[in-house]
């Protein structure tokens, strides 16, 4: 039987998608291990662990290969230590599945890391479309003062692998403020704890720069939302 066409009003101001199939939210307390400054995270989580960092609404008309999942991500502005609020980040479980993000409101970054450890950053703002190619780890960051709202769509059989962020540490996919230099963000050099098989090399320099102690042993984001 054919799936029926549907229409979905996007509200950039509210960060919502009309007639979405599901909504989930990530609170600060859900995001243990994401931020470099663990003391700042612990303090913020103790103070207001229920604070919503981001909300996702999406619609999956059918799970079958060949269909699409589409939706909206609304990220609140904020920082933990010097880092802006960010999403967990993932690679698609079916690695060769791409994704499109489209800026609706606010100012953000899409941080991407290739299987070779190359980092790319695309600035997101209203009406900017960002193509996340197959096999690239991706994570969004709200670097603005207001909510960052992006719509997205990707093949329905993509799936998400969140474990990749722990396994590969994905240090490159992190940003922080540098008020002294006037830069809005920087990225950390890629430096996995144990270089995954597909990485070519890791220098002592980049290894030393990977200062983030990961907590994958404390809690894993798993593959569920
Ligand atoms: C899924 C797509 C988005 C993200 C959402 C939250 O492939 O990229 O729906 O799930 O932006 O990010 P994350 O990393 O917490 O799933
Ligand atoms: Zn994705």
Image: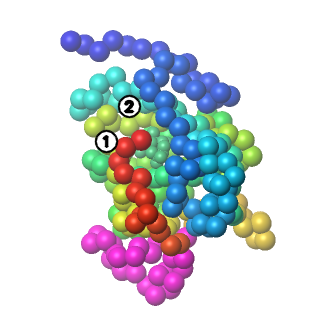
Question: At 50% across and 73% down in the image, what residue appears?
Answer: 213
Q: Indicate the position of residue 198 as horizontal and vertical percent values.
A: 29, 70
Q: Earlier in the sequence, mark 1 or mark 2?
A: 2
Q: Indicate the position of residue 6 as horizontal and vertical percent values.
A: 42, 14
> Looking at the image, which residue sits at the far bottom?
204
Question: At 67% across and 60% down in the image, what residue appears?
Answer: 43
Dot label at residue 33: none
> Looking at the image, which residue sits at the far left?
1
Q: Are marks 1 and 2 in contact (CB under 8 Å)?
A: yes
Q: Is mark 1 within 8 Å of ligand 1?
A: yes
The N terminus - image quarter: top left
Foreground residue, 29 or 129?
29
Query: As displayed, is residue 17 above or below residue 196?
Result: above
Q: Is mark 2 within 8 Å of ligand 1?
A: yes
> Looking at the image, which residue sits at the far front?
46
Question: At 51% across and 76% down in the image, what residue appears?
Answer: 210
Query: From which residue to which does the magenta span run?
Result: 188-211
Q: Quadrant of ligand 2?
A: top left
Magenta residue check for 94: no
In the picture of the structure, the residue carrying the numbered disc 2 is 69
In the picture of the structure, the residue carrying the numbered disc 1 is 158
Foreground residue, 34 or 73?
34
Secondary structure under badge 1? Answer: loop
Q: Horizontally, is 140 left or right of 159 in the view?
A: right
Main secondary structure along the magenta-highlighted residues: loop
Q: Residues within 10 Å of mark 1 (few under 14, many from 20)?
A: many
Q: Is residue 199 visible?
A: yes
């Amino acid at each position: 039987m054919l799936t029926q066409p549907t229409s979905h009003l996007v509200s950039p101001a509210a960060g919502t998608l009309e007639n979405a199939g599901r909504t989930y939210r990530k609170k600060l307390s859900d995001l243990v291990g994401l931020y470099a400054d663990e003391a700042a995270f612990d303090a913020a989580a103790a103070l207001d662990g229920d604070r919503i960092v981001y909300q996702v609404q999406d619609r999956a008309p059918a799970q079958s290969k060949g269909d699409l999942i589409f939706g909206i991500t609304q990220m609140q502005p904020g920082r933990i230590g010097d880092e802006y609020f960010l999403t967990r980040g993932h690679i698609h479980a079916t690695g060769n599945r791409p994704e499109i993000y489209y800026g609706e409101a606010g100012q953000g970054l899409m941080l991407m890391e290739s299987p070779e450890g190359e980092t790319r950053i695309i600035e997101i703002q209203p009406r900017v479309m960002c193509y996340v190619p197959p096999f690239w780890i991706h994570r969004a960051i709200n670097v603005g003062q207001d909510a960052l709202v992006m719509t997205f769509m990707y093949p329905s059989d993509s799936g998400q692998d969140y474990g990749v962020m722990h396994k590969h540490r994905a240090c490159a996919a992190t940003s922080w403020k540098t008020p002294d230099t006037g830069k809005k963000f920087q990225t950390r050099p890629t430096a996995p704890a144990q270089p995954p098989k597909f990485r070519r090399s890791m220098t002592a320099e980049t290894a030393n720069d990977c200062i983030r102690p990961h907590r994958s042993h404390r809690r894993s984001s798993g593959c569920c939302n």
